[in-house]
């Protein structure tokens, strides 16, 4: 990927706002609290909590914000914390968001603060780990809150700090995450004019910031398929209808939707089956098989067409073999959309804070983020922050959601500065 910002460089160079007035001050303050930010991150990493269960994390965040003299709302969307910092001058309102939840993953990383937490998740005993870096997000936003609270008299407007639970998805039968926070009014009272989010990335070198205007992350929908056949003895499959074989054919059929029926030059799309359940022993053909998977799309029209093709493909393959199939496509998250005007406006901020060569225009990703619910309501910008040691090969870095996920903490100070300067520069440029 070329380390240029394409036409954005020229546009940003012509912006005449008072952008960057506070950047040197923020840098000095972020340098002064870097060790504390790392300490916060290590504590959170060692004490992770699953979605909608972030009780101790929320207490820690709320106590920190209250100690800074920031107005605090607790138990927003169950365990969320919202802080409101009113500046000393009138102006608009900007929101900064960090997610708090961990994952049911057993950590393998050899670090002194590795998680030893164990729990039972959906009936299975497992470890709990911050395997997506949400601990770093919380620590960085706590650091930004401290810096901005010290500068409140100079802030022309209001800053809302959103510490969000359940980004990874609420447990079955529960609401949660950004969608519930929006529903409970997190972008109201005060009315938020723009929202910013940062996500650490284990395969992006420390010091880099990556972004994409427009559709940046995919819409995600959970897919559940139940195939019903006719149970029989494994030695005489012709006396029944085998839902296992039918399911195998369905999985292959689903892949042709992407590879042969979808215009991939327009946008990327993914259909993946992650879990198959059926049967009790080797010599019994079961009556039912359940498959669970994920659908990722970056274009609303492609999303609609792919959903229709999934229903048709699954139903027809099942019927051709004498089975039946039930398809459920759950609501999921919408596309994470970076407002082009806001992205252009804040490009100069990213360049000034990280350095021109370290701000990289990237392609859309098929990962998903419920930050999309905020950005659907108000202009939003969601960027990726480097968390990989600078000398490491990205191909060797462990991906997110894995036991070996690792973050180089030397990149956290840049995240603190980005959060802070996003808020300050936006409020200065939008009096």
Image: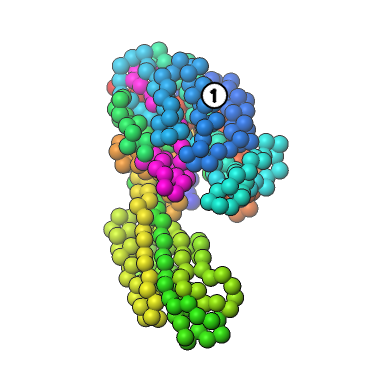
Residue 149 vertical placement versus 221 (above, below): above
Residue under the point 39% across and 77% down: 323
> Which residue occupies the foreground of this view, 138 or 154?
138
Residue 419 vertical placement versus 401 (above, below): above
Residue under the point 42% across and 47% down: 173
The x, y position of residue 364, in whole percent, is 41, 51
Residue 317 vertical placement versus 220 (above, below): below
The picture quadrant where one finds residue 115 is top right
Residue 139 vertical placement versus 221 (above, below): above
Give the extent of the magenta segment.
155-179
The x, y position of residue 357, in whole percent, is 50, 40
Q: Is residue 394 visible?
A: no
Badge 1: few (under 14), some or many (20 or more) residues near its Cα, within 10 Å? Answer: many
The x, y position of residue 27, in whole percent, is 52, 23
Residue under the point 46% across and 65% down: 290
> Which residue occupies the foreground of this view, 85 or 16?
85
> Which residue occupies the foreground of this view, 424 or 221?
221
The picture quadrant where one finds residue 264 is bottom left
In which quadrant of the rendered image does the C terminus lie?
top left
- Per the image, the residue denoted by label 1 is 30
Mark 1: secondary structure: helix
Residue under the point 30% across and 65% down: 308
The x, y position of residue 187, in whole percent, is 33, 31
């Amino acid at each position: 990927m070329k380390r240029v910002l394409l036409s954005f460089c020229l546009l940003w160079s012509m912006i005449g706002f008072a952008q960057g007035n506070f950047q040197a001050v923020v840098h000095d303050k972020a340098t002064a609290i870097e060790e504390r930010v790392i300490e916060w991150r290590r504590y959170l990493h060692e004490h992770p909590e699953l979605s909608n269960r972030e009780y101790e994390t929320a207490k820690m965040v709320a106590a920190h914000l209250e100690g800074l003299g920031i107005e605090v709302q607790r138990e927003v969307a169950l365990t969320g914390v919202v802080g409101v910092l009113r500046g000393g001058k009138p102006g608009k309102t900007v929101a900064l968001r960090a997610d708090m939840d961990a994952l049911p993953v057993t950590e393998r990383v050899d670090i002194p603060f590795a998680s030893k937490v164990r729990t039972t998740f959906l009936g299975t005993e497992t470890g709990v780990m911050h395997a997506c870096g949400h601990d770093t997000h919380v620590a960085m936003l706590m650091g930004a809150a401290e810096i901005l609270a010290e500068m409140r008299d100079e802030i022309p407007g209001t800053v809302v700090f959103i510490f969000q639970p359940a980004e990874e998805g609420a447990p079955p039968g529960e609401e949660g995450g950004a969608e519930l926070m929006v529903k409970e009014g997190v972008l109201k009272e005060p009315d938020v004019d723009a929202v910013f989010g940062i996500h650490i990335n284990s395969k992006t070198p420390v010091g880099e910031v990556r972004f994409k205007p427009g559709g940046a992350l995919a819409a995600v929908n959970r897919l559940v398929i139940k195939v019903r056949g006719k149970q029989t003895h494994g030695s005489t499959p012709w006396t029944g209808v085998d839902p296992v074989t039918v399911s195998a054919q369905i999985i292959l059929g689903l892949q042709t939707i992407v590879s042969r029926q979808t215009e991939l030059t327009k946008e990327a799309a993914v259909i993946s089956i992650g879990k198959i359940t059926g049967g009790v022993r080797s010599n019994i053909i079961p009556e039912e098989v359940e498959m669970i998977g994920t659908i990722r799309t970056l274009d609303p029209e492609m999303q609609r067409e792919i959903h229709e093709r999934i229903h048709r493909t699954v139903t027809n393959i099942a019927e051709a073999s004498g089975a039946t199939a039930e398809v459920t496509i759950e609501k999921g998250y919408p596309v994470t959309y970076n407002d082009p005007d806001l992205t252009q406006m804040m490009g100069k901020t990213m360049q000034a804070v990280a350095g021109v060569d370290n701000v990289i225009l990237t392609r859309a990703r098929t990962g998903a983020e419920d930050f999309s619910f905020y950005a659907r309501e108000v202009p939003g910008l969601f960027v990726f922050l480097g968390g990989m040691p600078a000398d490491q090969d990205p191909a060797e870095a462990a991906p997110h959601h894995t036991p070996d996920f690792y973050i180089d903490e030397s990149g956290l100070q840049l995240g603190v500065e980005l959060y802070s300067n996003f808020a300050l520069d936006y409020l200065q440029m939008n009096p």
